[in-house]
Image: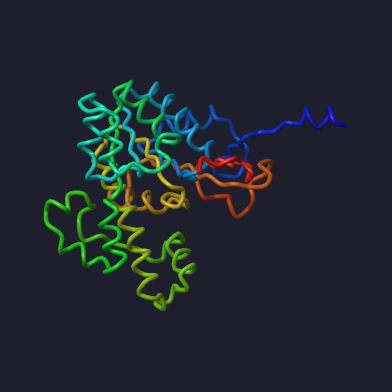
Amino acid sequence: MAVSGWTQKMPAYQLFNEKGKPTSYAKMLRTLAKADVVLFGELHNNPICHWLELQLLRDLHQTHDSLVLAMEMFEADNQLVLDEYLQGTIQEKHLLNEAKVWNNYSTDYQPLIEFAKTKGIPVVASNIPRRYANLVYRQGLPALDSLSGEAQQWIAPLPIEVDMQLSSYQEMLAMMGGSSHGGESGEAKTLVHAQAVKDATMAHFVLKQLPRPVFHVNGAYHSQDKEGIGWYLLQARPDLTIMNINTVEQESVDKLLEKNQTKADFTICIPSDMTKTY
């Protein structure tokens, strides 16, 4: 009995396609290699996500030597500091001190940056500066109009359209006690708008890299259901081929739960008891 237990398969993850059927890494890679933009929706504290991001970056770079890495984890106004580090002009300590890196940078994102630096892969700081997202949350979208031209270069072009009927934004409204019938509170609405300006800005800086293929790393909520960043990309360029990856955690990875199906072209299903990076 004990020996039998030891020999059971203990998969760290299982990949599923857009139909919710199990698939392989090789099949996923072949499909992603044909895309203009790949949106990797991660769970920020999940080590399997970060390991797979690194594998995909390596393999997509082998397919496309013009590949660009773009990341939610760096804000657009830190692009100069990031470039200076990638070019070897400044030391890592300056990047860490000046680029507002996330607390889990050393465990989760440093491997991506170091691989990009070694291979000469451009890295795009795609996210809106957090102070401007907070401004929207506190005062609403019109507050962005008061920013200087210098400040607005780090944001998607104004005015920013927000489709409040997108399912991801509806979920946020529901969590804040709002509704889809115009009854959302001011705070719920501005929270969605703050999320939307992040999505729009990340899409904006991805679009600036085309026609080079872009591998974008972001939180799953920013790209699941082909909304968020993907929605803004397609508003600007309906002709783009966009592939999205979503990440979910389940008690068992043998079968993708119905609620987790159809959210992405590929879904990474990870055991819910997987250790976390923070």
Q: Is residue 206 left or right of residue 148?
A: right
Depth check: 55 or 65 in front? 55
Q: Residue 164 location in percent, x, y?
A: 38, 66
Q: Residue 207 appears in which quarter of the rendering?
A: top left
Residue 144 in percent (x, y) is at 20, 62
Residue at the image position 22 percent from the left and 67 percent from the top: 142
Q: Vertically, is 6 above or below 100?
A: above
Q: Name the residue rendered at 33%, 61% in the picture.
A: 194
Residue at x 63% of width, y 53% of height: 258
From this viewpoint, which residue is outermost toward the bottom?
Answer: 183
Find the residue positioned furthest to the right: 1
Question: Is 103 in front, or is 137?
Answer: 103
Q: Is residue 194 above or below residue 51?
A: below
Does residue 259 appear to the left or right of 73 in the view shown?
right
Query: Residue 255, position in %: x, y?
Result: 67, 44
Query: x, y percentage for residue 148?
Result: 12, 57
